[in-house]
Amino acid sequence: MTENGNNEQLKVHEASSHSGTRYWGNVEVIEEGETYRISRIEIKPRHGIKPQIHYHRNEHWVVVSGVAKVTCGNEEILLCRNQSTYVPSATLHKVENPGSIPLVILEIQNGEYLGEDDTERPYDLNLVKPAPES
């Protein structure tokens, strides 16, 4: 197989490794390049993505359907269909679906590095302490 063919297979594998079912919903990578990734994210009613932070990428979220409760830094906002928000790098953020229908978001990640090892969660950063066990 040609080197170009190997690169295409690698891109397909990388995209599919980011796609899939999660406990809170589903992620489908629509398109991916060296410095960007576009995904369709569906979050189940009354579920959300845990708080996280990325240092090498920014994210743009556009609500396609449902309502998103977005926390970005110290700001919390509600977004409806056709509204969007920007998540700068190095900012703690999360998104929740407070509604009773699935929340669908188009996410555009843009940055010099898109690897999953650039995702940290508050427990990893000691920003949130787990509750003591009884």
Image (cartoon, rainbow, N blue to C red):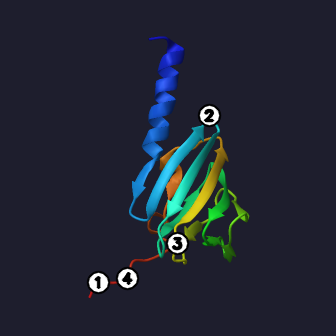
What's under tag 1, amino acid-wise?
Glu
* Label 4 sits on residue: 131
**Mark 3 or mark 4, which is nearer the start of the sequence?**
3
Contact (Cβ within 8 Å) of mark 2 with mark 4: no
Marks 3, 1: nearer the viewer: 3
Q: Position of residue 108 (x, y in %)?
A: 65, 50
**Mark 1 or mark 2, which is nearer the start of the sequence?**
2
**Mark 3 or mark 2, which is nearer the start of the sequence?**
2
Q: Position of residue 33 (x, y in %)?
A: 62, 35
* Label 1 sits on residue: 133
What's under tag 3, amino acid-wise?
Ile
Identify the element where label 3 is drawn: loop
Contact (Cβ within 8 Å) of mark 2 with mark 1: no
Q: Position of residue 37 (x, y in %)?
A: 60, 43
Identify the element where label 1 is drawn: loop
* Label 2 sits on residue: 34
* Label 3 sits on residue: 101
Identify the element where label 2 is drawn: loop
Give 87 or 42, whichever is nearer the viewer.
Answer: 42
